[in-house]
Image: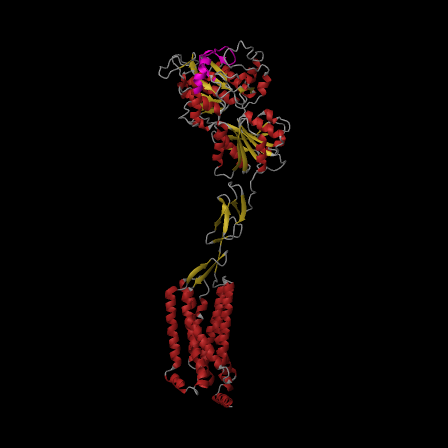
Amino acid sequence: MVTMRHFLTSLYLLGTFLHTLTKCTMSATDFHLDGDYLIGGLFNIHYASGGLYQTKPQAIDCSSQLFSLSDHRRFQMMRFAVEQINNSTYILPNVSLGYDIFDHCSVTKNFPGILNLISVNGLIQSWFEPLKNFSRVMAVVGPFTSTDALTIAPLFMTDLIPLVSYGVGSSHLSNKIKFPSFLRTVHSNDGMIEVIVKIIVHFNWRWVAFLNSDDDYGRDGLDLFIKKIDGTDICLAYTKALNDNTNYSQIFQQIEAQKIHVVIVFAPEATSEALVETAVQVNFRNKVWIACDTWSINKRLSKMKEIRNIGTVLGVSQPVETVPGFNNFIYSTKRQTFFKNEAQNVFCNQACNCSYVTPEDIISADSSYSFTVYSAVYAIAHGLHNALQCGDGKCSDNITMFPYMVLEELKKSNFTLLNQNIQFDENGDFKSGSYSIVFWNQTGDAQEIGFYSFYPSVQFFINNTMIKWYTDGDVPTSFCSAECPIGYVQKQTGIHKCCFNCEICPNGTYINVTEDPYNCINCKDTQWSEKGSTSCDLRVVEYMPFTDSWAILIMVGAWALVGMTLSMSVLFVVNYNTPVVKSAGGPMCFLILGCLSLSSLSVFFYFGKPTVAFCILRYLPFLLFYTICLACFVVRSFQIVCIFKIAAKVPKLYSWWMKYHGQQLVITVAFITEAFLLLISYSYAAPKPYQDKVWYPDKIILDCEINPKAISCSVILPLLLCSLCFVFSYMGKDLPKNYNEAKAITFCLLLLIFTWIIFVTQYMLYRGKFILMFNALAVLSSLYSFLLWYFLPKCYIIIFQPHRNTPKYFQGLIQNYTKTISQ
């Protein structure tokens, strides 16, 4: 669309200026040099400012417009390059090179010079005619600005006349379908913007303003900048297109309001000068300015009084190459008067009006783009040299030369000029070369502090120590929001990702700033982290090993229990027929002691790394055999109560109990029932190993998982038996002293209940590896409660008080109890 608009403008103006063109002839001035082959030149020696209103078709009077000394220097550089080539014995040895140069001061009202370059004797060659009477202009050097190039380029593309620009940056001109004969000895805006972005990233600036000219050059730069910062941490906080009507003061107020400390100015020299001068006038202070190559080494600005107040100026510039012989060339023309009078200035518009310019002024002017002009002329000369098959001190005179032939050779350019390689890529863009990174130092000079090279490999370097910041110390910062502390994520608060609040990452998460600064990342199940972490650590895997001192102590206690039950069994066998053994349960004692020993097996499976077998055996022996123990004590407590209290009142119940061996029946039924319930429970959901990752964020506790529904099925019977046992034993609390089994059973049951209450409370408060030790202790305490408080007193009487272990002593106690009851 942009190209079409410029092309239509060109066609419209073509007819407007043709009649004016035919009235103009060329005189021997600095703008023209005869030669065998001509090259054109387009330079903005003057700039038309503001709108130009015309009432009839006519060429603009460029000499009345603003004069540009730096462009005049480039104009003289082309003249010098042509003179140097004509004096060369190597390039175009027997061919003279001439030029037609035009002051292209206006985009749309300065076409006579353009049309002169593509015409012959004031006529435009028809496409339908054979290639004859073709213009002797083989190529054109210029123009300088993107808008100029986009406007006039279509006129040259039709006949494939090479248009070699020394300053155009627009990336649109890299399109070879639309601009097949356009080349340039500068890098496109893409390279310039790339360097600017790298500078911003290098100093970690995030919050920037981009001020661009309201033309093709500036708009292209803005578009490229937006694309380049996509995916980076840079935010474009403010942008504004600059033109002649822009209120610069208002721009500075808006930048200040948004607390932007880095300002990028991507605009032509004249626009940039007006902007910076206004900044000085309104006292816009303490910013970092990044200048593009159009004004980065502008000596008038850098030498301004109070320029330091605006802050620190960094810039990207074309490397300044000293061209040998140029100064002498300028001084050699010192006695000549440029365009002495109006009579000599026959050709329309080619009036310099610069007689006041001295050679010193030209030499000291901004030298940027001087080498690009120099290399553009030499590139055309080398292309013509190759097209004419020059060699051995002469060029072929049998070749009819056309611009497209020069174009083909231009595309192949590969030569060295002042130690710089001159090459073009497939898009006609400059392939080699570099940019200089400059800093306006305290003396007002643009001091080189770094570079960005394109060829043979991309390299970027800045010497930070050479920069004196306006802060008189550290590098200035430019953020919308201050950097988050380590371990915090950024939560965006507006349309810009640079504006955010900081939130700390909770436990179990971490932040990786390089990958995602906006979200906390969850740790893996096997890892953990504290609040505000930047990485996860492996969780400590814990379980109670067999080698743990507490585990050894508990297992020793279990073995001691087995040893004590064995010893008591032997003691009871020896004293089997004594009253104490009979009152303790007789043969039932051996069943109880055996089940207590078998129940202790569970203790050993609370230690070591859990497996399926360990988890099953951790609960099965205790639940099964301890249920038998409880059944035995239920029977025993019932028998005691029955003998002393129920037999006399309900003799039939007693006789039924004795006749059908009630104690054996109850114990057998309890055993079978519990075994069946355990079978159902384990079939539904057997205990299995699992890793507890919930209770402790930094640990993994290896334990056995039990299903609450399944385990409740297998503990119903033990709880029922425990309740019955407690009821019966409590009923017999006032029996004879030597028949105090009921009291002992009651006390053992109280210890049992108290033990498990303590364990359940501990389990609710603590789930570490020592919970396994507490569980094993609870099991062991349950076993020891009956062993120590029920059987141990019997053993004490048998061993140390044998006089109380006689039938006579027991009969006396029963008689006294009977008398007490009868009273």
Q: Nearer the viewer, residue 751 or 498?
A: 498
Q: At which x and y percent is residue 772? A: 48, 64
Q: Residue furthest front?
A: 55
The colour style of the image is secondary structure
* Residue at horizontal 49 percent and vertical 85 percent from the top: 805
Q: At which x and y percent is residue 187? A: 48, 27
Magenta span has 336?
no
Q: At which x and y percent is residue 518? A: 50, 45
Q: Nearer the viewer, residue 217 or 626?
A: 217
- Relative vertical location of residue 527 with respect to residue 54 in this rendering, above or below: below
Q: Is residue 788 in sight in this rendering?
A: no
Q: Image check: 363 left or right of 554?
A: right
Q: Residue furthest top?
A: 343
How many marks overall?
A: 0
Q: Image check: 360 left or right of 516?
A: right
- Relative vertical location of residue 102 with respect to residue 578 in this rendering, above or below: above
Q: At which x and y percent is residue 278? A: 60, 28
Q: Nearer the viewer, residue 792 or 503?
A: 503
Quadrant where the N terminus lies? top left
Q: Is residue 1 in sight in this rendering?
A: yes
Which region of the structure is painted magenta? 12-40
- Relative vertical location of residue 571 with respect to residue 227 in this rendering, above or below: below
Magenta span has 28?
yes
